[in-house]
Amino acid sequence: MKLRIIAVLLIAFALVSAFAAANEDKKIELVVFHGQGCSHCVALRTFLDSIQPKYPEMNVIEYEVYFSQTNRELWQKYADAFGTTIQGVPMIFIDGKNIVGFNDKIGTEIEQEIQRCTKEECPSPVDKLKEGGSSVSIIGESSPKDDPATTEALKKVTIPAVITAAAVDAINPCEFAILIILLTTILAAGIRKRVLYAGLAFSLSIFISYYLMGLGLYSAIQATGISKTFYVIMAVVAIIIGLFNLKDYLWYGKWFIMEVPLSWRPRMKTLLKGITSVPGAFLIGFVLSLFLLPCTSGPYIVILGLLAQTTTRNHAMVLLLLYNFIFILPMIGITLAIYFGFTTTEKAEEWRQTKLKMLHLIAGVILILLGIGMFIAMKLGMI
């Protein structure tokens, strides 16, 4: 009798242990491809963290694709295995389904899939990667840029916008004035050859400082997940700054001007007149980039708002290099013209003064058109 009781207890213990082990081994795996700074990805991560305590068996495998070519290649392999295409981030693979984007409705869909997998046997997406086949797709409210056709259209819009805004920024009279003062000071020192190196060094430092500032602001916008809001604000800012430039064309000097503030100019000139060396010109460029911000930051910030909403970080870095190269081209041109004797600093300054209002007119019209174009792109669903 005792032996029977012991045998029954052992069998019961074995069954309980087996059941517990089965439950312990059972995992519901989600493979998530996301991008750093993607607002939809942040929302998805927050959602998954909130439901994790309810589903301890849930195991989320994450891959960041903006900064990893290896992960991007793996993403393509998953898309091929599930019989679908890459449609943007976040992209979730669970059982035989792939889910793109995130919103409240998608969150409900994901939780329903997890609940189903707690009751049924759901193979890991990793196994699907080995086997291949087709899958069910669920598309949520992701950024329209995540759609391949829209991405191609956005490229056609974004690159001309970057070039145009950079050209507007490049003809800003502020940078011309600063460079002319610097070159005049160096010429007065009597070493003409130094003009070339100093002008190029100054242009390079402006390029580096503006590029780093732009990259930093772009990263901040992406990291906070406010790219869409920032985009709308920048579209409005473009139109406002454009109108202010038109004001300078019609009523120059009245109320305010879209240039370096008058109160800053004496200090700026004092700094420039103390520079007679190439290293000094390079270093002063970083300092004076801050003086230039009030009159040159408008188009730049507008473009950063556009890039934050329409491009990945790697693409944005390339476009910012292009923007800032175009921005310093006139400075390089003026330096070369003065060095080779095609013009003088006096004639360059005279030209700047006579074209001042016209430069404001050109900048104003283009910025207004850029702002309106940004709103039209959003209205057409491209943003």
Image (tube, rainbow, N blue to C red):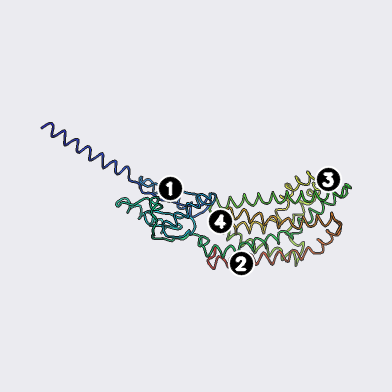
Residue that carries the numbered disc 2 in the rendered image: 373
Residue that carries the numbered disc 3 in the rendered image: 276
- Decide: few, some or many residues near mark 3? Use Cα within 10 Å; few <14, some 14-19, many ≥20: many
Q: Quadrant of residue 164?
A: bottom right
Helix, strand or loop for disc 4: helix
Observer-nearest residue: 27 or 292?
27
Residue found at the far left of this picture: 1
Query: Is the C-beta separation of discs 1 and 3 under 8 Å?
Result: no
Q: Which mark is residue 227?
A: 4
Please provide percent x and percent y for residue 73: 50, 52
Residue found at the far front of this picture: 131
Q: Tell me the CA gap for discs 2 and 1.
A: 40 Å
Task: Reply above or below: 125 against 146.
Answer: above
Please provide percent x and percent y for residue 97: 39, 57
Query: Is the C-beta separation of discs 2 and 1 under 8 Å?
Result: no
Task: Reply above or below: 224 against 250.
Answer: above
Label 2 or label 1, whichever lies nearer to me, is 1
Helix, strand or loop for disc 3: loop
Looking at the rendered image, the quarter that the N terminus falls into is: top left
Label 1 or label 3, whichever lies nearer to me, is 1
**Earlier residue among tags 2 and 3:** 3
Residue at image point 71% right, 59% down: 169
Residue that carries the numbered disc 1 in the rendered image: 61
- Decide: few, some or many residues near mark 1? Use Cα within 10 Å; few <14, some 14-19, many ≥20: some
**Earlier residue among tags 4 and 2:** 4
**Earlier residue among tags 3 and 4:** 4
- Decide: few, some or many residues near mark 4? Use Cα within 10 Å; few <14, some 14-19, many ≥20: many
Residue type at the position of mark 3: Thr
